[in-house]
Each structure stands twice: as structure tokens, then as C-alpha cells.
Amino acid sequence: METTEIIRLNPDNIADEHICCAIGNDKTNQTRAKQKKEWLKQQFAHGFVFKKVNVRGKVFIEYVSAEYAWKPVEAPGYKMINCFWVSGRYKGQGYGRLLMEECIEDSKDTFGLVVVSGKNSMPWLTDKKFYQKFGFEACDEAPPAFELLVKKFKKDAPDPRFRDVVRSGTIEDKEGVVIMYSNQCPFHEDFVEIMLAAARNLGLPAKKIKVDSLAAAQNVPCPTGLAGVYLNGQFLSYEIMTAKRFEKVLHQQMD
């Protein structure tokens, strides 16, 4: 590894440290970073942890006590991995293991760790095979192919579970495109607008719902707790997309 220095963001250093996702110095990335940093500042009060390897890239892990996690998951006594990302040329260098070991060590006084993954490889979600190397096992699932994984430190601890709101894969609004999102990802504000415009370009009604509180985030119908994209009331995706890709996905659904 180029370095093993790990930096933990906190209220004192967050203004000067990059947040890995939005690194560029251009106006767009500065705006994205500011949105995420403001969200993080609010979460620090609840013990939210953001650790990164000191490299100029996306190499970081986020975790917090499950009661404060912006996920539709019930896991009292556990810590929840919110986001975990090692990208590009930094893969295969041991950074992921290093960050996971940090997370495990920080969580030893809890029932264990919980994370949302997929039954198979899914974009933007760390593959469950990685978690399995550290002893994570599936404890619940949600449509269409999400899994809740747990690593227990206490064998008799209760199993975490998805909240019932995610189990139908549907929402009440059955008209057009609905996108739910929050500022826990710095790219959401921009790309949600791009996707809404793409939907409207195809003649579809389209609206956004911004999730701006812990209570709301714990009751969103998308298992990841991140962006939830719905078409005519049915779950379509948890990903943010370019206009071209989103139009293609919508065409496929409407054909």
C-alpha cells in the first residue's frame, strides 16, 4: 500500500479534508462536497464515523450505531455500515481490509455489524463475498435482490431485519417517475434533476422527494436507504444515472 495512514473526519478537520466522493476543485464538485459535509456535520453528533485512507481517491468507510443510521433497518445494539468504497487503482491493495478491520475494532462493544448488500454483485454496493471473508452472514432479504448481512460479536444477539416498508417493492404514488433521495450522497442533488428531466423528456410525470430527517430515512421503501427510483409505483432502481442511461432504462420498461 502507498500509505496506511487513516484519517477520521470530525468537526475540526472536515473543512480542510476532502470527502473522497467529490474531490474536484471545480464549482460543481465544490457544491457537491459542501452538501455532503453539511450532512456529515449533523451526523457527527450521533457518533457517525467517516474514515478514509490518506490518498487522493475514493477509499473510505462510514458507520454509525444502527439507531442513527439512515437506513430502513431495525438493528438495536448493532452498528451499521452506511457506505464503503474502494475504487479504481486502489482496489487490491489491502485498503478495504484495513478499513474493515478499523470498523470491526471500533464496534467490539456492540452486538455486531450490519450492512446492506446484494444476493449477487450489484453496482455501488460492496460485493457480499468481501463481507463473507470477515464472517458476515445473510439475516434478511428484500426485493428485488437485496440482502441484509450481519457479523455478530455476540452469538445470542437478535437478528437485524429490514423494516416492513421495503418488502413490497412499491409505493403509493402510481403515476410516472418518483425519486427519493438525501444528501448522504453528494451526487444526488445533481443527478436527480438530470433524471427527472430525462423522464419528462419522454412525456412522463416526474417528481422528487427529498429525505431530510432520520425518521424519514428509516422509513423509506428503498432497502439501501439511498436513492430510490420508482416507475408507476414499482421499484425501478437504487442507482443515480446519466440522462442517456436513464432514458434507456425507462424505454425498456415502457416497451
Image: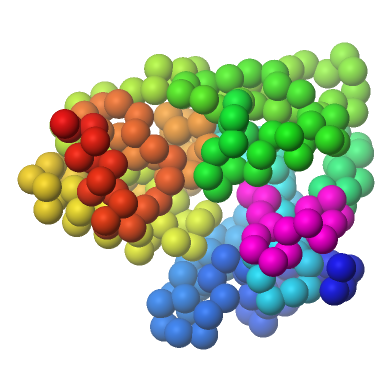
> Does residue 94 sit above or below 75 in this rendering?
below
Against 201, residue 159 (above or below) is above
On the image, the x and y values in percent for residue 74 come to: 63, 25
Q: Give the side of residue 121 with respect to residue 243, left or right.
A: right
Residue in view at x 70 percent, y 28 percent:
149
Residue 95: image x %, image y %?
81, 59
Residue name at image x 89 percent, y 18 percent: 155
Residue 95 colored magenta?
yes
Q: Nearer the viewer, residue 242 or 151?
A: 242
Q: Is residue 209 magenta?
A: no
Display colour scheme: rainbow
Residue 130 picture location, percent across and down: 76, 39
Q: Which region of the structure is painted magenta?
A: 82-98
- State which quadrant residue 135 falls in: top right
Residue lying at the far left in this picture: please name it. Answer: 203
Q: Quadrant of residue 31?
A: bottom left
Task: Please indicate whether residue 15 sits to the left or right of residue 65 in the image.
Answer: left
Position above or below: 184 against 34 = above
Residue 152 picture location, percent across and down: 84, 26
Quadrant location of the N terminus in the rendered image: bottom right
Residue at the location (90% across, 28% down)?
153
Query: Is residue 248 visible to us here?
Result: yes
Quadrant (top left, top right, bottom left, bottom right) of the C terminus: top left
Q: Residue at x 18, y 48 (%)?
A: 199
* Label tally: 0
**Where, by quadrant of the figure, is residue 192 drawn?**
bottom left
